[in-house]
């Protein structure tokens, strides 16, 4: 299964082979060409699982600035091939220096976690209004109050470990009431806690997959402004880990991924037949369910809003790119404070 959505090719079918055919990207399965897509219409290619590509196509895509991203079948980012980094090298040097100085990294990490907590709280308060159960509504309201308390405590954090501690506890509290936001009564979509690598239930499988899509967009956003996605402030450096992209994704998790997953479940746009339980307990989605999430994710990105800081209308899908620009301005010293995106 191959989907072309918003100038991105998503290749879901295992065993797919992509090759250059003139000025098109040809996609074959078992030696049969299933699709041909003109390269000038494409900005990125995303492959899930066992998807391969000819070196000639890889060369052509690199020349045209078309990125290639490989994800595991569940959606974990494996690698990304992109054009050489753009932007001023002085920006990246400033990023590296700031990341090495705790006193400079601390306020930025604190702001990013504050954005995550506030947007998580916004989702809880918004969802609570639509709950039928008084008990569920009260549980969600209490959790939102606890997140507000966490925001006050976060302001006093004096080390990066303290900031990470507030982030972890707030996330645990947020997910402790996540099941109250799921309106379907079936046990098929029950949720007890956030788990990953591998996800152990359908809800966690959907969350992990959507986070992977969002992470890919955050990597692209940071690269586009000249920042290094691998050197972060909140997340520690680790080989192969896009730490700065993981920093940036925090303020968008609730707005992009969590809200989308809840909508797909509550509107019955996904069902339990679209999930596969592997030996050992891991839960994976079939191609049809992944397609549903990708389509929902891209539709979500089209929604319009007014950016509270820039005071201009934009699409939800451009928020990571706008926030990456704000982050770059802060690192360069053009802004005294980093302002995370806050839902209103």
Image: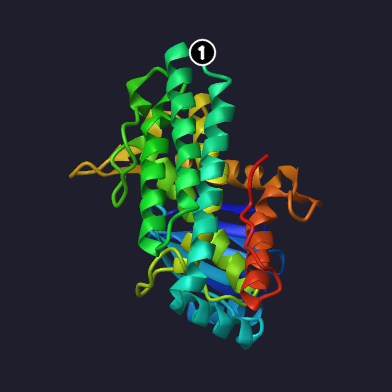
Q: Residue sitting at 50 percent across and 52 percent down?
A: 155
Say how the picture is coloured: rainbow
115, 207: nearer the viewer: 115
Q: Where on the picture, by quarter, is residue 64?
A: bottom right
Q: Residue 223: percent from the left, percent from the top?
A: 59, 73
Q: Residue sitting at 51 percent across and 82 percent down?
A: 97
Quadrant assignment for the C terminus: top right
Q: Residue 250: percent from the left, percent from the top?
A: 50, 53
Q: Residue 319: percent from the left, percent from the top?
A: 66, 55
Q: Residue sitting at 38 percent across and 37 percent down?
A: 173
Q: Residue 209: percent from the left, percent from the top?
A: 44, 49
Give the class, few, some or many, for how many residues have Cα within 10 Å of label 1's Cα (few <14, many ≥20).
few
Which residue lies most toward the right here? 312
SS at badge 1: loop
Q: Seen in the image, is 84 located left or right of residue 1?
A: right
293, 158: nearer the viewer: 158
Q: Is residue 220 above or below residue 150?
A: below
Q: Where on the picture, by quarter, is residue 285?
A: top left
Query: Residue tagged by mark 1?
Result: 132
Q: Residue sitting at 53 percent across and 69 percent down?
A: 68
Q: Seen in the image, is 34 located left or right of residue 146?
A: right
Q: Is residue 140 above or below residue 338?
A: above
165, 135: nearer the viewer: 165
């Amino acid at each position: 299964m191959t989907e072309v959505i918003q100038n991105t090719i998503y290749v879901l079918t295992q065993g797919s082979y992509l090759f250059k055919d003139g000025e098109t990207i040809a996609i074959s399965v078992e030696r049969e060409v299933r699709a041909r897509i003109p390269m000038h219409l494409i900005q990125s290619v995303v492959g899930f699982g066992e998807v391969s590509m000819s070196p000639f196509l890889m060369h052509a895509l690199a020349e045209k600035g078309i990125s290639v991203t490989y994800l595991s079948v569940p959606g974990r980012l494996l690698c990304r091939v992109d054009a050489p980094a753009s932007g001023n090298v002085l920006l990246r040097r400033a990023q590296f220096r700031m990341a090495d100085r705790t006193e400079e990294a601390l306020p930025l990490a604190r702001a990013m976690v504050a954005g995550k907590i506030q947007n998580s709280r916004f989702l809880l308060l918004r969802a609570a209004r639509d709950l039928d159960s008084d008990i569920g509504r009260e549980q969600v309201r209490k959790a939102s109050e606890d997140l507000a308390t966490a925001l006050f405590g976060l302001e006093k954090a004096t080390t990066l470990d303290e900031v990470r501690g507030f982030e972890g506890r707030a996330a645990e509290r947020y997910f402790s009431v996540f099941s109250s936001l799921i309106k379907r009564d079936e046990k098929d979509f029950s949720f007890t806690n956030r788990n990953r690598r591998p996800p152990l239930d359908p809800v966690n499988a959907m969350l992990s997959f959507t986070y992977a899509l969002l992470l890919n967009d955050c990597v692209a956003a940071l690269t586009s402004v000249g920042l290094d996605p691998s050197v972060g402030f909140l997340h520690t450096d680790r080989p192969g880990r896009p730490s700065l992209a993981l920093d940036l994704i925090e303020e968008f998790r609730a707005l992009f991924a969590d809200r989308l997953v809840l909508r797909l479940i509550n509107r019955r746009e996904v069902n339990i037949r679209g999930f596969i339980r592997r030996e050992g307990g891991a839960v994976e989605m079939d191609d049809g369910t992944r397609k549903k999430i990708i389509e929902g994710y891209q539709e979500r990105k089209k929604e319009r809003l007014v950016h509270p800081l820039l005071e201009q209308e934009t699409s939800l899908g451009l928020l990571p790119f706008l926030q990456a620009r704000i982050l770059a301005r802060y690192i360069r010293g053009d802004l005294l404070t980093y302002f995370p995106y806050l839902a209103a």
